[in-house]
């Protein structure tokens, strides 16, 4: 028995190496570390411990920034089928004891790629699934779910604001966004070559300030209705969500 | 039958042992150190292979978070249940876990702060023990125990709870004429000395993991469609508790942000606005901050489930509220503007009608079956 399985193993190995020769893509694999960095106006996003100036004189202390990434993938330079790294990830910054980088590692075929692509939000197929299908600590757990109609919350920005400039952070801001209509595909172009056996790293940067319109088109937090966006009222959220989708940057 | 014969043999040999002890008139030790071949750590007999157990969970509940280090078995669960109800776990064999976690109160004690051995008052309110398999955030109000079985180590030693040395507890369990067989049946051990603290707490955690509560009026209305909400409950659910169609900009109770169905508690650590402190260093009970080591987490506690909440008064980590109406009033006040308060605590206008509606909805979360479910009841009664 033992010898038989050993023989099989050898055969299998032979087979694999034959394939290798034909397809340059499976030449080898690399460990890719994908970092997701959270920023505010170019500064590291430090949950709670830092205050960030807001145009118009206010300041913000963040409690939570999170968003879903669906079908995270690498686009091959030769136009071949994308390499799917993950079906769903919840990128989440909620702790004062952690930094602003969330990392995931994936084993990917070495080769040349031209872009990272993902869906911002929960892709329609999964957004159609109910949380009871998942374990209580799965990214798709019930706490990120509104209800049977509104479905998953794609992204959340939560902060306490000081609107009067008195250093008292007593104006809560909770912007909860999501709906199939808001789902956006993000493509971040960058030519990269991953050589076999090397470590590769890519960083996706999200800057909340840009989602809030930056200095030019600033989302007005002095309007109470802008500070609370929940459930059905996604009109207010659409602007923030779309800008969030547009502002991602990819660095090496 | 062979067991009986064996038992007979063991009893006989024990009898012969005591026969070689000192004369009864002699008030010296009851055992004789000189006796040859005294079985200090005799073999345990009986079945030694446990049967896997699969949790029964209503399909509308989340899938459980199972602990690979502590797989559930029929024998383990039954053993854990006994240990949970057995006073030999406490000082002088006089205090059980169940003294503070009573089934008829959804495994709470009805007290503001827990009361342990000699009437000593602890610093926190006893938690309900339902649906622990849906919690991936650590146990206790502050998440101080990462795993459920680790949690069970502490009440035994805690001087405000059962105040006993584990060594004494283990000695009593090893010396019992029932437990060794049960430990063997669960873990396949051969000798009494192999009964360790870890095996004890793992069995307790197995039992605790089976306490699942998912059959309340709410479930029967919402998931099973066999009952209806009253108008008041409906108002409490749709336009107050859950976060569904909140009008733009409206101040709204939004309990569902942190206590969403069907678990009714996200188990995350938050400051829900209880204390008006001058600075983050001033919380009397630092809660999660003492565990994480960050002052920004001071005053944060785990968001617990609201299932069976009508039975688990008083409320919050320190039992400060006696009624659910007080709880709702607290949330309506909207906290104290402390910088680490959760931004979902906003305050909201509260009329008497709305208050009654929210409380009516909270009352719909009681699972009456849980309170008398024989699987969770005292096995010694």
Image (tube, coloured by chain):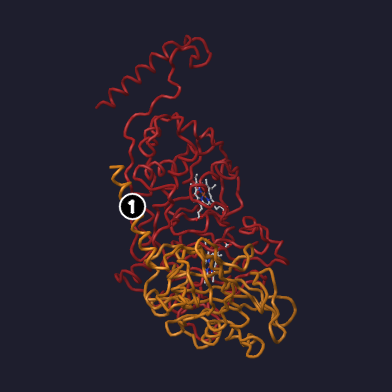
**Which residue appears at 28% of the width and 25% of the height?**
B4
Q: Is residue B206 left or right of residue B352?
A: left
The answer to which of A56 and A22 lies nearer the viewer is: A22
Numbered label tally: 1
Which residue is the site of mark 1?
A: B54
Circle 1: element type = loop
Give coordinates of residue A200: x percent, y percent: 54, 66
In the image, the chain rendered in red is B
User: In x, y percent, where is residue A101?
Assistant: 60, 67
In the displayed structure image, the side of residue A144 where residue B112 appears, left or right: right
Q: Position of residue B226 (x, y in %)?
A: 29, 70
Position of the C terminus of chain A, as image quadrant, is bottom right
Looking at this view, is A126 or B91 the one in front? A126
Q: Quadrant of the N terminus of chain A?
A: top left
Quick one: which residue is furthest to the right in this view? A166
Question: How packed is label 1: few (under 14 Cα within 10 Å), some, or many (20 or more)?
Answer: few
> Does residue A10 lie above or below A252 as drawn?
above
Note whether residue B188 is visible. Answer: yes
Could you tell whether A95 is left or right of B236 in the image?
Answer: right
Find the residue positioned furthest to the left: B1
Q: Residue at x 54, y 59 (%)?
A: B314
Question: At 52% across and 16% down in the image, what residue appears?
Answer: B29
Q: Quadrant of residue B298?
A: bottom right
Residue A55 placement: quadrant: bottom right
Q: Which chain can be seen in orange? A: A
In this view of the protein, can residue B326 be seen by the observer? no
- Residue nearest the viewer, comparing B29 with B189: B189
Query: Could you say which is closer to the camera, residue B172 or residue A247?
Result: A247
Residue at 48% x, 56% y is B128
State which chain disc 1 sits on: B
x, y percent for residue B186: 37, 39
């Amino acid at each position: 028995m033992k010898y038989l399985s050993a023989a099989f193993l050898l055969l299998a190995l032979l087979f694999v190496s034959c394939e290798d020769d034909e397809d340059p893509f499976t030449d080898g694999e690399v460990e890719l570390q994908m970092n997701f960095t959270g920023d505010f106006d170019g500064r590291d996003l430090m949950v709670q411990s830092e205050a960030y100036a807001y145009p118009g004189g206010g300041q913000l202390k963040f409690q939570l920034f999170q968003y879903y990434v669906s079908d995270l993938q690498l686009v091959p330079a030769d136009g071949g089928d994308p390499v799917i790294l993950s079906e769903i990830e919840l990128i989440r910054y909620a702790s004062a004891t952690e930094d602003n980088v969330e990392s995931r590692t994936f084993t990917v075929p070495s080769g040349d790629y031209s872009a990272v692509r993902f869906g911002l939000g929960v892709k329609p197929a999964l957004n159609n699934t109910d949380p009871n299908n998942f374990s209580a600590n799965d990214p798709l757990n019930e706490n990120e779910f509104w209800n049977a109609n509104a479905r998953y919350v794609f992204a959340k920005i939560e902060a306490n604001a000081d609107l009067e400039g008195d250093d008292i952070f007593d104006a809560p801001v909770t912007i909860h966004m999501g709906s199939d209509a808001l789902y956006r595909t993000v493509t971040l172009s960058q030519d990269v070559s991953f050589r076999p056996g090397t470590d590769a790293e890519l960083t996706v940067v999200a800057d909340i300030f840009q989602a809030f319109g930056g200095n030019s088109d600033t989302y007005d937090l002095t309007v109470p209705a802008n500070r609370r966006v929940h459930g059905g009222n996604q009109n207010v959220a659409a602007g923030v969500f779309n800008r969030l989708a547009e502002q991602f940057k990819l660095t090496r | 039958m062979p067991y009986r014969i064996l038992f007979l043999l063991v009893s006989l040999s024990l009898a012969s042992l005591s026969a070689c002890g000192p004369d009864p008139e002699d008030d010296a030790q009851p055992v004789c150190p000189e006796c040859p071949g005294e079985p200090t750590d005799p073999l345990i007999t009986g079945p030694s292979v446990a049967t896997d157990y699969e949790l029964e969970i209503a399909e509308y509940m989340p899938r459980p978070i199972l602990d690979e280090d502590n797989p559930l078995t029929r024998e383990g669960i039954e053993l854990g249940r006994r240990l949970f109800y057995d006073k030999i776990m406490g000082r002088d064999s006089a205090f059980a876990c169940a003294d503070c976690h009573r089934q008829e109160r959804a495994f709470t004690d009805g007290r503001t702060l827990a009361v342990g051995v000699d009437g000593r008052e602890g610093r926190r309110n006893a938690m309900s023990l339902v649906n622990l398999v849906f919690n991936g955030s650590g146990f206790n109000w502050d998440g101080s125990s990462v795993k459920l079985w680790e949690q069970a180590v502490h009440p035994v030693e805690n001087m405000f709870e059962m105040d006993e040395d584990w060594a004494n507890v283990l000695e009593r369990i090893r010396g019992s004429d029932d437990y060794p067989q049960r430990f063997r049946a669960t873990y396949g051990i051969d000798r009494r000395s192999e009964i360790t603290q870890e095996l004890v707490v793992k069995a307790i955690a197995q039992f605790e993991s089976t306490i699942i509560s998912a059959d309340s009026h709410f479930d029967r209305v919402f998931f099973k469609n066999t009952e209806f909400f009253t108008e008041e409950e409906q108002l409490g659910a749709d336009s107050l508790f859950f976060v569904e169609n909140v009008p733009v900009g409206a101040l709204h109770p939004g309990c569902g942000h942190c206590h969403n169905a069907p678990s009714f508690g996200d188990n995350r650590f938050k400051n829900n606005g209880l204390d008006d402190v001058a600075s983050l260093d001033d919380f009397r009970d630092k809660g999660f901050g003492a565990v994480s080591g960050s002052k920004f987490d001071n005053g944060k506690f785990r968001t617990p489930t609201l299932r069976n909440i009508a039975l688990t008064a008083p409320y919050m980590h320190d039992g400060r509220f006696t009624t659910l109406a007080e709880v709702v009033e607290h949330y309506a006040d909207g906290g104290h503007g402390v910088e680490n308060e959760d931004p979902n605590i906003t305050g909201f206008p509260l009329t008497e009608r709305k208050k009654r509606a929210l409380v009516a909805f909270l009352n719909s979360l009681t699972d009456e079956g849980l309170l008398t479910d024989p699987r969770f009841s005292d096995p010694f009664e």
